[in-house]
Amino acid sequence: MCILKSEAAKSLNTGELKILSQNCVEVDFKKDEVIFKQNVLSSNVIYLQSGMVKLIIAGPQRKQILKIKKAPCYIGLPTTMGDKINHYSAVAVQNTRACFIDISTFKELLRLNPDFSYEIIIELCKSELDQFHRCVNLLQKQVFGRLANNLIFFADELYNSDEFDLPLNRNELADLVCSSRESISRMFTELADEKIIKIDGKRIKILNKEKLAKIRDKG
Amino acid sequence: MCILKSEAAKSLNTGELKILSQNCVEVDFKKDEVIFKQNVLSSNVIYLQSGMVKLIIAGPQRKQILKIKKAPCYIGLPTTMGDKINHYSAVAVQNTRACFIDISTFKELLRLNPDFSYEIIIELCKSELDQFHRCVNLLQKQVFGRLANNLIFFADELYNSDEFDLPLNRNELADLVCSSRESISRMFTELADEKIIKIDGKRIKILNKEKLAKIRDKG
DNA sequence: CTTAAAACGTGACATTCCTCACATTTTATT
DNA sequence: AATAAAATGTGAGGAATGTCACGTTTTAAG
């Protein structure tokens, strides 16, 4: 049963786990499949078992990739609990397995088990702090710094390796750092020219992480 | 007792309210006084009884005003529960009365009362959704749109009036919309020239709200 | 009331980076 | 393999806006 692996679920007892297992459906998604959609009624809390997902919001001018999340984690907690309607979409960037928990079941568990609630509260708080930092970073740095920031995030947080396949194409990278496809292209070639990264299509290898970190930090 | 007025506190019973009242201190702050400070150990959840507060984070290049919050509300919930150290500061922008709740008391209440936990969860979720929208707005709009957005926010959400005294000076407005003092100045004069607003020092009167809303929406 | 300090307004200039246009490469489809 | 479609790279030009410099106004302090 999927959610068993969740931190928060450790605090559930056998009876509660049974409730959960009876109201929880596992679904597989292929790359680019939509897991939930902005403006649609939200009725499930989703726990990612495996894979990776991008959260996308339709902004006033263009779409914006809010963040990329890797299993294991919850997705859509704020949008499911915070409003009746989804405020953003979730799309698989790899093959992904997700566990859909009915919202009333989830609420029931929160009510039954304060420890579970507590874990969820901590998770929400951390996520909001994270969001503050991400936002300030995007706002105050120039495109170069924002791109470097994300490349290092990919290497350190998503793939645990300095060589990886980009989870996004150039257009989506632009949507992630709020720039344009052309600028991303230009910066990639510049980073490659300076031997900071090596690029081959979607394949990225970070050659000089100190320099890249300097670009990230200087903005 | 201050926190009685909180939505979440409605779910507390008499015994729980007693615990709360015995571990809760009211403090008054004058304009510009610091309520809590970034990078300092966080040990209290704060409930604003009256007044108004700005949340400020030190960004990579400059300071950033995350948001302005008006009583009654909690402040610092994410930063107190999400980490040991404050990730941002809170400063009064008016005379403000705040209720400091010891964090262990707060956690105790969360554990005792699932309804209270639930209310906090909902509040955190809404706040994160809000933060997503604010962030995307700041990222995708030009300075004009961001400024217009905030002027309308001041009028509609903070003061419930189209005439008000700005809670921030020009420099702080720049920190709020991530721009420069000079740009804010120039935009104010331009908005005044077009008879969209009337300015007299800190006093602002919105003369043509439709036009202002158009500027906000067009970016 | 006087004076210093802070806040504010405005012009000139430089920089970042977006947009448009088009060529090239890669991927998908038949 | 041939063709279409999508993704990518690159140059030129322009718009938005930050920075610097300086003058003026407002506020605070003595």
Image: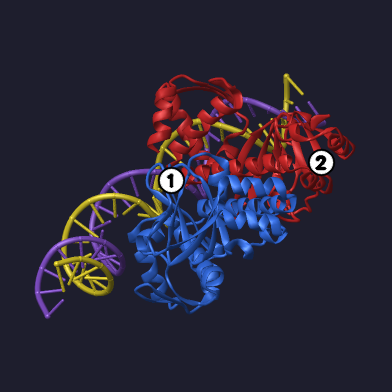
Chain colours: A red, B blue, C purple, D yellow
Residue B86 lies, in percent from the top left, at 48, 44
Q: Nearer the viewer, mark 2 or mark 1?
A: 1
At 52% from the left and 49% from the top, the residue drawn is B44
Toward the viewer: A109 or A167?
Answer: A109
Toward the viewer: B81 or B178?
Answer: B81
Q: Name the residue carrying label 1.
A: B38
Quadrant where the image shows the N terminus of chain A = top right
Q: Amino acid at mark 2?
A: Ile
Label 2 chain ID: A
Q: Is residue A52 left or right of residue A135?
A: right
Toward the viewer: D6 or B208?
Answer: B208
Q: Name the residue carrying label 2.
A: A101
Residue A175 visible somewhere in the drawing: no
Quadrant where the image shows the C terminus of chain A = top left
Q: Residue furthest right?
A: A22
Label 1 chain ID: B
